[in-house]
Amino acid sequence: MIPEILAIVLATAIGVALALLLDHEGRGAIIVGEGMLLGIASCAAILFVFAIATITWSRSLLLAMAVLVGAIAWWFARHRVGQLRSTVHYSPASAIFDGITALGLLGYSLFSTMAPLWEFDYICNWGLKGKLFWEAHGIDWSFLQNAFHRAIHPDYPPLLPLSFDVLAVVRGDWNDRALGLLNVVFALALLLVVRRLAAEETGSDLAGAFAAAAMLAFAASPWIGLAESPLVAYGTMAILLLRVGDSRVNLAAVLLGLAASAKNEGLTLIVAVAVALVIAGRARLVPRLWPAIAIPLPWLVARLMRDIPTDLATGNVFSRVLAHVENPAPLLEALAHYPVGKPLYWLGIIAAFAILRSRLVSRERFALSAIVVQFAFYIGAYLSSPHDLDWHLRWSWERVVSHLTPTLTYVVIVQLMRAVGAQPADREVISEQSVSRSTPEGGIAAERV
Amino acid sequence: MLRRWAIVAAALIAIGGFEPFYYRVFFLDRARTRVMLTELPFSKTPHLRDFYLDVRARTKPGDTIAIASRYTKWDGGYDYVYARSLYILSGRHILALLDPQDRPHPEKLAGADYVAAYQGEPQIPNFATVWRGPYGSLLRRQR
């Protein structure tokens, strides 16, 4: 896996420069975490541009372009290198929680790279496209236009398949065991940001370490090789950064655009964030989210121009919604039937809301509104589903809930830590100022047919 | 009091969200788990993965391969066999000889260079068996 690891290191080096340019407040681990996500996306974007320009992919071309982008970014970011130094005082007591997180992440990386990726949606969708693009040395438009099997979803955005291709192009071969490393990168990036951000917000390094440990299972998606992992990483990071200040709106918008390039749910997340900003009294920031639209736009246009079909919008969407609203029993039964995670976790969340209801509602209005609006979009998607609802929920419900639980967990944990007595940080959350198949083993047992 | 309850809630969230598998993975028999995970997507059809790997080794990118199996219902097995061919046989054009409404499409054979027959060796006009393995056979169009 050495070529893949080198590719990730190179991508991170590029991404860190971009993070320094986009995030003027971030320090230490935050910049590194942001850099990992931006770097992978930058390399994938280079392949996308090559594909659109009908330039055949090659290792030398990708590396040359990546080095060029990195060199330019570092030239402009050269005065900000000091931001990479951490300014948080490290508490020795944090080592316990950091150890738990690091060990869990190591176990996750063992799991993610243990075998050729095995998920059905990897084999028939994300991994299949990545492999086809790799073999075609570009995007195989003809395959997408003529996709016969419903699981292929040719309309789904290409960030994850292209990220697989970055690793394959650097290796010069398709190694579907090493591709699980991307899951680890996405999880690590989010945890680095969570670790540092929570410490900054609470003024307690121990609280930061606890938050990262509590978030491990939510950042480390059990669906290896599926787009849940990048969607959670990009989407959650965008909300968390936007949540703490207006100054990071540019970076948050870029991350939102990348979430929308990872999975279609990312498109609704842009709307959810915009609505949440309005609800939180920060409507002035909404126009500044334009990069979130601009980044996925080339794919949406290409998809339209090449007549690539999409299934949720097929047929009479309105009549399907109407039928499901008139007879909600199948949806409600399915919602009640399929699990949303571990009961003890939800008991903790409910307890937190019972204890800190007013604090959570007033201080976390933005993040909680984004979660609620995005959740409403998911319900809307089920209402308009052309598939059998029981089947649709069975294979997606836990996964879509997993898109929202990382943000929910973070905001609840941070507010609980504040209530526990961690010193408030200099910077408050901006809203204060302005106004089961959730386990890897469960997933393996439930492998679909 | 608030502080105490906040600790309880935080502990519930952390313990409830804890994923023991990521720690237990260190003690797994990794070789065995690797084999299990590799076969997992093909577990309902024994040796299907091996069969497709054999077919891949005997065909080249750009070839058109029709997938034949003893399953005559889309949801009764054919979908399973067909969907899993796409990844392993990537680079080839894969044809389904059955549609989701269970209608057979023998006319698609006209566009096929090969027929990959899982667990069988069908007799198809203009095609001859070029390879026979323990889990199926590969038929090639006769020129």
Image (cartoon, rainbow, N blue to C red):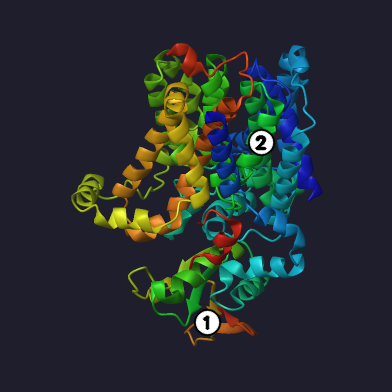
Q: Quadrant of residue B120?
A: bottom right
Observer-nearest of A273 and B7 = B7
Crowding around mark 2 (Cα neighbors within 10 Å: few <14, some 14 to 19, many 20+) is: many
Observer-nearest of A257 and A213 = A213
Query: Looking at the picture, which amino acid does disc 1 mark?
Result: Phe
Residue A285 on image: x %, y %: 45, 16
The reply to whether label 1 and label 2 mark residues of one chain is: no
For mark 2, what is the residue?
A: A210
Residue A91 on image: x %, y %: 77, 28
Q: Residue at x 49, y 27 (%)?
A: A292
Residue B121 shows in this picture: yes
Q: Residue at x 34, y 44 (%)?
A: A379
Q: Secondary structure at mark 1?
A: strand
Parent chain of label 1: B
Crowding around mark 1 (Cα neighbors within 10 Å: few <14, some 14 to 19, many 20+) is: some
Q: CA distance from mark 1 to mark 2?
A: 65 Å
Residue A357 on image: x %, y %: 43, 29
Query: Looking at the picture, which amino acid does disc 2 mark?
Result: Phe
Q: Is residue B66 above or below residue A133?
A: below
Residue A175 shows in this picture: no
Q: Is residue A182 above or below residue A68?
A: below
Name, please, the residue furthest toward the front.
B1
Q: Secondary structure at mark 2?
A: helix
Q: Is residue A386 above or below residue A231?
A: below
Left or right of A241 in this view: A60: right
Report the disc number at residue B127: 1
Residue A397 on image: x %, y %: 43, 52
Q: Residue at x 52, y 64 (%)?
A: A446
Parent chain of label 2: A
Observer-nearest of B134 and A202 = A202
